[in-house]
Image (cartoon, rainbow, N blue to C red):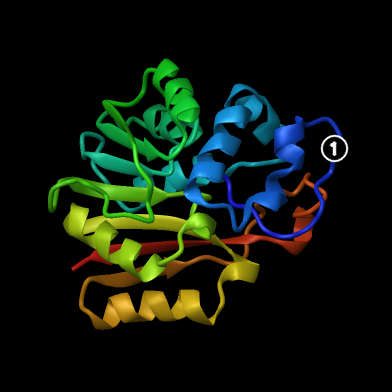
Amino acid sequence: MVESRDGDASHNDISESASDLTRMTDADPQSLAAYYDKWAGSYDADLPKMGYDAPMRAAAIMQDQGVAPDAPILDAGCGTGLTGLELSKAGYSDITGIDISLESLQAAEAKGVYRHLKKRDMNKPLAFGDNGFGALQCIGTLTYVREVKKLFAEFCRVVKRGGIISFTQRADLYDGAFAKAIQATIRAGLWEQISHSDPMPYLPNHQDFGDQKPIFYDVFRVK
């Protein structure tokens, strides 16, 4: 999924669903699922028009961190599978995707790069066993999570010790509460920070995002 925030979106050369992206920030899970179900059919065409390159950057992070090609990876908030597709191109073969949108999951399945795909609401426990993944990525999804501290604990639970967790967050949403959730997870001894990027482009060709709303890429190692 792609994160949303406030403002009126541009309708130039993108679908109605894409242009309405910024209206979904405070949507409940049912409304959010319905929105992405509706968008799934044009999602893959819309995202390149908006200059979205986070899946490629996320896959490069996994390679840069030395995640083994056969490591089981959880793609949390996989959407239509653009993130998994880039992982596959980078040589990763054991990818599990979760998302709240069934239509998006069906589009992801059609790409043929996921070993497993499951419908999950990340505001709830992830319903995976402990230490089952060697790495996890969560790209363009954290806006919709209400209790991010609990989700970070879940990430650390399902990823084995020494495994990599990589996620994005919008710079304008990297606020006190979000930063405190990261620090609380560090103090709890669950992970250690490896890197925090400079502000990077998010949706540079979207009127409501452009250069004013970049994102950070954070990378952690589970302890």
Q: How many marks?
A: 1
Residue, disc 1: 11
On the image, the x and y values in percent for residue 127 come to: 21, 46
Residue 158 lies, with reference to residue 113, above or below; the image says below
Q: Nearer the viewer, residue 141 or 165?
A: 141
Residue at 62% across / 30% down in the picture?
A: 39
Q: Is 79 on the left-hand or right-hand side of 96?
A: right
Viewer-nearest residue: 65 or 170: 170
Question: What residue is at 65 percent from the left and 24 percent from the top?
Answer: 42
Q: What secondary structure is marked by label 1?
A: loop
Q: State the residue in front, 220 or 13.
A: 13
In the foreground, 132 or 197: 132
Horizontal and vertical percent for residue 146? Answer: 46, 64
* Residue 63 in view: yes
Amino acid type, residue under disc 1 in the picture: His
Locate residue 209: give its quadrant.
bottom right
Give percent across and percent down for residue 122.
37, 51
- The local crowd at label 1, few if under 14, some if 14 to 19, many if 20 or more residues have their Cα within 10 Å, is some
User: Split into 4 quadrants, where in the image is the C terminus?
Assistant: bottom left
- 71 vs 41, left or right, is left
Residue 216 drawn at (x, y percent): 55, 63
Q: What residue is at 33 percent from the left and 26 percent from the top?
A: 114
Query: Is residue 1 visible to us here?
Result: no
Q: Is residue 80 above or below residue 6?
A: above
